[in-house]
Amino acid sequence: MDFGPHAGFIFTSYGLCLFTILALIAWVRIDKAYQERALRELAEQGFSRTRPDDRNR
Amino acid sequence: MAFWDYANPTRFLRLVQVVLPWLIGLCIVAFAAGLYMAFFTAPQDYQQGNTVRIMYIHVPAAWLCMMCYTVMSISSIGTLVWKHPLADVSAKAAAPIGAAFTFMALVTGSLWGKPMWGTYWVWDARLTSVLVLLIMYLGLMTLWRTMDDPIKAGKAAAVLTLVGALNLPVIKFSVDWWNTLHQPASVVRMDGPTIHPDILWPLLVMALAFTLLFFVLHLMAMRNEILRRRVRALRMRAASVAQPGTAAATAQPAE
């Protein structure tokens, strides 16, 4: 398929959009993994939302 | 179930878990259909040639960067007026997504402008007001990071967001109010779209795909923000156990 003399502008536009969208997806997934790991580590220390009275441990 | 029932973050997270897979599926289907139409069924424009294909990502990105700020403005009202627990979570989660869509709109517009206008950038009202929108997003993201307390940061950001909302009608009507190089609206018009259906349909399908992408990312980012606040609350509780009487006094509930 021939996109003519401006193919470079077209593919650069789509490439940059793809990169930005992939960066957004990576951001939310990495952030989720980080928060879940932090919650897991806190739970291992005995601090979790299911055990409200950690002071009495 | 009433809208207010989703003020409970735990209930909201359960809803996200159910809705997200469906939204992701719909988003992938919409992108597949939109890209197929954009590259294989849509004809060249009689003036723009193949560069019209840039419009299938530029226009949806531009719509979404404004819609995202509208969502943030409504959320800010929710924060300031109703103190809805998820309102500032929604606003904070939307800001980076809005900034990304604004960046996409500016860059793709610039890459379309070079072959069509002969320049990557002009300081006309539409382009400048969208650049201001990008700066607003970046400023709000910075504001949220400068305050430790998410409740206080949320209120300050809500005020700034609502001030920045004045820019939305300026962006929309800039092409009517001033003599700009940017063309006037050709889809959302009182007298209907002026675009041929062969080009309009791929544009609308891509707009649907971008909208679904926004909701997918927004829900995921909101979920992360709720988890972040839980982590913060638990760390403060841990600190108060380690040093009784210090952190407990400043702790804010996660929900």
Image (spheres, coloured by chain):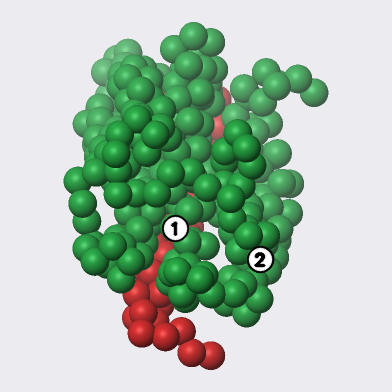
Mark yes or no: residue B225 visible: no
Mark yes or no: residue A52 visible: yes
Dividing the picture into quadrants, the one containing residue A49 is top right
Residue B202: % across, % down: 63, 63
The answer to whether B211 appears left or right of B145 in the picture is right
Q: Which chain is red?
A: A
Q: What chain does badge 1 belong to?
A: B
Report the residue at 32% width, 13% height from top.
Answer: B249
Mark 2, residues whose alpha carbon is within 10 Å: few (<14), some, or many (≥20)?
some
Foreground of the two, B191 or B56: B191
SS class of the residue under badge 2? helix
Q: Colour of chain B?
A: green
- To which residue does mark 2 refer? B198
SS class of the residue under badge 1? helix
Report the residue at 51% width, 31% height from top.
Answer: B71
- To which residue does mark 1 refer? B58
The answer to whether B229 appears left or right of A48 in the picture is left
* Vertical position of residue B129 compared to residue B203: above or below: above
